[in-house]
Image (tube, helix red, strand yellow):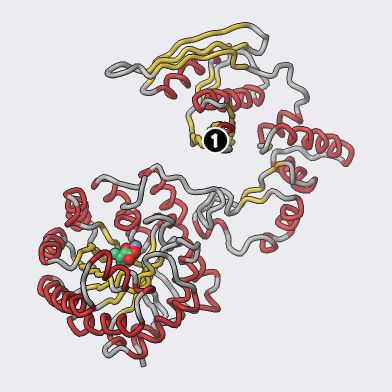
Amino acid sequence: MNTASSSNRILIFDTTLRDGEQSPGCSMSPQQKLVMARALAELGVDMIETGFPASSQSDREATAMIASELRNTGLCVLSRCLPGDIETSARALENAVKPRIHLFLSTSPLHREHKLRMSKEQILESINKHVTLARRYINDIEFSTEDATRTEDDFLAEAVMVAIAAGATTINLPDTLGYTTPNEMRNLFERLIATVPGARNVVFSAHCHNDLGLAAANSLAAIEGGARQIECTINGIGERAGNCALEELVMALKVRHPYYEIDTGINSQRLVQTSQLLTRLTGMMVQRNKAIVGANAFAHESGIHQHGMLRNRNTYEIMNPEDVGWAASQMVLGRHSGRAAVEHRLRALGYLLGEEELNLVFTQFKDLCETQRVVNDSDLQALMQGPSESEGYRLASMFVGDGGQNQRASARVELSDPEGQHVSETAEGDGPVDALFSALSAATGVELVLDSYQVHSVGVGADARGEANLSVRYQGVEYEGSGVSQDIIEASALAWLDVANRLLRQRGNAGKAAAVTA
Ligand code: KIV
Ligand code: ZN
């Protein structure tokens, strides 16, 4: 009986700080890595790959800082098959309570010939030599056959056999290019675990990249084939299209537990906050429709879905948002929403309407959806209060200067106020956007503390335009605004005014005198 590969507990090896961090736009300072490592430990991962110490001073520092603080989570570092790398790795892990060195060497013909220029014999010799050397420093050694899934079957088996014989305790078979498919992955693990001498005494691990969008599916297939460690990252960050997303793997195992019968040590209720922490640290946004942690993962807009959800949430949800760290499901009111959802939201806001009144408000709601993508609570309240006397503040013109070297950025805005009067203000700030928002705030008397601010381009080429979206929270209600313009800074100003006008409408007072602070 194979003890490691038949266990029903899987090890979660998190490589957010190594494979994730080495991808474009995701680099972190040692201090940021420490903050993230604490969150990963709280989340319950079994092993954190802290970096590649031989590659940078920053990775050495981060590893040493994390090692001297985290006592209960395994800590691992990546190392090439080079004596110098191994020594540097061992030194970086000096204070770790549960240290591991992760050695890797490519085995595929493409990598042997074009990257390493090494023969098969030289590869096997190097594996033997460096795993043996690493074992002199640390007992827990993982060996990865890089590009395993494009390696000849028999040579891969030989490489794994040599690594095990030299003392590797974990064998990782990476799908480095995200090339394989679930069936192939499952067969690969089954075959190697069944045939390689010593395989039953080590833990087999999968490390799947997402080039074909199959990383989570391939990782699950590897588990079915006997893998008992999965390498993954928060939000799926990593080289190119990323790695298997930890949150997807963990929730697939949890939601489909009757099928897989596999447990992890992850506290799934911390998934969203860990994801959001990573976004804050790296600035790398998560797409709205990203499984589990994307803003739309538990948002429902279509009338049919909302109706079903209101009767029984299981109709359109396979897991509870609370189980992954969201406060609740979200019923997004928009063009596709039906009367039931509008009535439900109005009730929650305290409006109990009769049939006729509801019909009228629903018609107004549908009209509003023609000009607005999302209708939020403040919009509904405005509908219930009747037509507003004013359309709010409008941007007439703006000028923003970045200030140049050693000077603060400045902005001047000219607006027409709710009464059609001309107002203009100038302000300085830490950057152009900060200066712009300060000028708008001075001109309107509205102070917004932003929950989120995002800009992205819509369309391509000469037609491309910038869209800015921002949200604020005011008295427990979230207000969102958006603006589109050929100029991203102007789009930001429009989005800011959009939110400010909603807030002012909500207050039933579009005048400057009554200051609103969100
Ligand atoms: O993708 C890969 O092959 C890797 C190895 C270094 C494990 O990241
Ligand atoms: Zn990788």
The reply to whether the residue tagged 1 has its Cβ within 8 angstroms of ligand 2 is: no
**Furthest residue toward bottom:** 1
> Looking at the picture, does residue 303 appear above or below residue 206?
above
At 26% from the left edge and 64% from the top edge, which residue is drawn? Answer: 115
Amino acid found under the numbered disc labelled 1? Gly
Does any portion of residue 47 appear in the rendered image?
Answer: no
Is residue 347 in sight in this rendering?
A: yes
- Whole-percent x, y for residue 195 in the image: 34, 90
Residue found 69% across the figure and 32% down from its top: 379
How crowded is the residue under tag 1: few (<14 C-alpha within 10 Å), some, or many (20+)? few
Q: Please report the residue visible at 39 percent of the width from the left and 82 percent of the height from the top.
A: 7
- Element assignment for label 1: helix
Rendered position, 402 above or below 252: above
Name the residue located 50 percent from the left edge and 22 percent from the top edge.
447
The correct choice, above or below, for 83 with respect to 481 in the image is below
**Residue 449 % position (x, y):** 48, 29
Q: Nearer the viewer, residue 342 or 286?
A: 286
Residue 262 placement (x, y as % from top left)? 46, 77
Residue found farthest to the right: 356
* Nearest to the observer: residue 89 or residue 316: 89
Q: Residue 223 falls in which quadrant of the image?
A: bottom left
Q: Quadrant of ligand 2?
A: bottom left
Asked if residue 309 lies left or right of residue 41, the reply is right
Give the position of the N terminus as an image quadrant.
bottom left
Residue 229 vertical placement versus 5 (above, below): above
Number of numbered callouts drawn: 1
Instruction: Provide the residue designation for mark 1.
Output: 461
Q: Residue 497 location in percent, x, y?
A: 58, 23
